[in-house]
Image (spheres, rainbow, N blue to C red):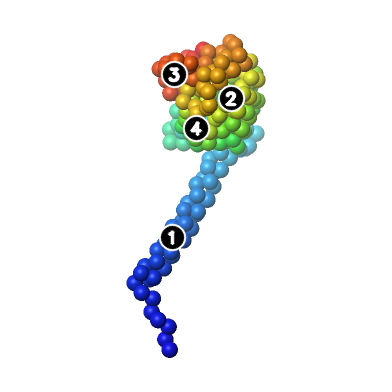
């Protein structure tokens, strides 16, 4: 006797089941591609650092992510022309003083390209979706020179990452506006105690944060 044919409802469920697994496989593949691309973007610029020095490597890395670079003796920020700027090699030997990576896909691994900078004074990481507490802790290598730091609107930075900033004794400007932390007023007080000489923006006790620029605009350091 022939097996009974599946009814319309059963056939529909079978098609939906196959479609579900097809979509699930496609989403998994897309996620793997996204992670691979993020890893490539944050690759360690070993060749550039060994060949041209840490400033060229850090500048090239920042520009490749769409960020900005400011050199010693210059007020204007260098922005990428495509994914590069021809002046990077021309400025070889000139210290990098500022990096603006606001909104860029920089990760914990990618920060390795910035850590050898001995003269870096300004670093903007506003709205960086992949910057977390571990990444903030890794910035300790820049504590001796860094004077301005923006972590505004970094969704993965919490009070645990901010607690590691006590090493930054030279810091004069810190933007922590838009961070999601419990008891922001208390966190602000703790930051002021840790960094008594630093102007802190964000987490005001009155809950009315002052207006401030998202990115450093080249008009001079904000301290």
Q: Which mark is residue 113?
A: none
The quarter of the picture where residue 137 lies is top right
Quote the CA–CA distance across marks 1 and 3.
46 Å
Q: Residue 9 or 42: which is nearer the viewer?
A: 9
Residue annotated with mark 3: 207
The quarter of the picture where residue 141 lies is top right
Q: Which mark is residue 162?
A: 2
Residue 129 pos. (x, y %): 49, 35
Helix, strand or loop at label 1? It is helix
Helix, strand or loop at label 2? It is helix
**Among numbered discs 1 and 3, the one appearing first in the sequence:** 1
Helix, strand or loop at label 4? It is loop
From the viewer's perspective, tell me whether residue 135 is left or right of residue 216.
right
Residue 88 pos. (x, y %): 52, 28
**Among numbered discs 2 and 1, the one appearing first in the sequence:** 1
Helix, strand or loop at label 3? It is loop
Of tags 1 and 3, which is closer to the observer? 3
Q: Residue 93 or 181: which is nearer the viewer?
A: 181
Compared to 16, does 113 lie above or below? above
Residue annotated with mark 1: 20
Which residue is found at the position 52% from the left and 22% from the top? 184
């Amino acid at each position: 006797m022939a097996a009974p044919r599946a009814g319309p409802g059963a056939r529909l469920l079978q098609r939906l089941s196959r479609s579900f697994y097809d979509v699930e496989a496609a989403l998994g593949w897309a996620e793997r591609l996204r992670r691979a691309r993020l890893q490539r973007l944050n690759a360690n610029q070993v060749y550039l650092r060994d060949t041209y020095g840490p400033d060229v490597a850090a500048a090239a890395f920042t520009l490749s992510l769409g960020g900005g670079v400011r050199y010693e003796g210059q007020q204007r920020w260098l922005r990428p022309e495509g994914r590069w700027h021809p002046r990077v090699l021309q400025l070889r030997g000139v210290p990098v003083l500022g990096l603006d990576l606001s909104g860029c896909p920089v990760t914990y691994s990618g920060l390795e390209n910035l850590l050898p900078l001995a003269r870096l004074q300004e670093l903007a990481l506003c709205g960086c979706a992949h910057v977390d507490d571990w990444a903030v802790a890794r910035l300790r290598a820049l504590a001796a020179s860094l004077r301005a730091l923006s972590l505004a609107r970094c969704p993965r930075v919490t009070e645990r990452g901010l607690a590691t900033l006590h090493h930054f004794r030279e810091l004069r400007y810190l933007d922590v506006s838009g961070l999601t932390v419990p008891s922001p007023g208390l966190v602000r007080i703790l930051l002021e105690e840790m960094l008594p000489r630093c102007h802190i923006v964000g987490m005001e006790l009155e809950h009315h944060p002052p207006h401030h620029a998202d990115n450093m605009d080249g008009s001079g350091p904000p301290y």
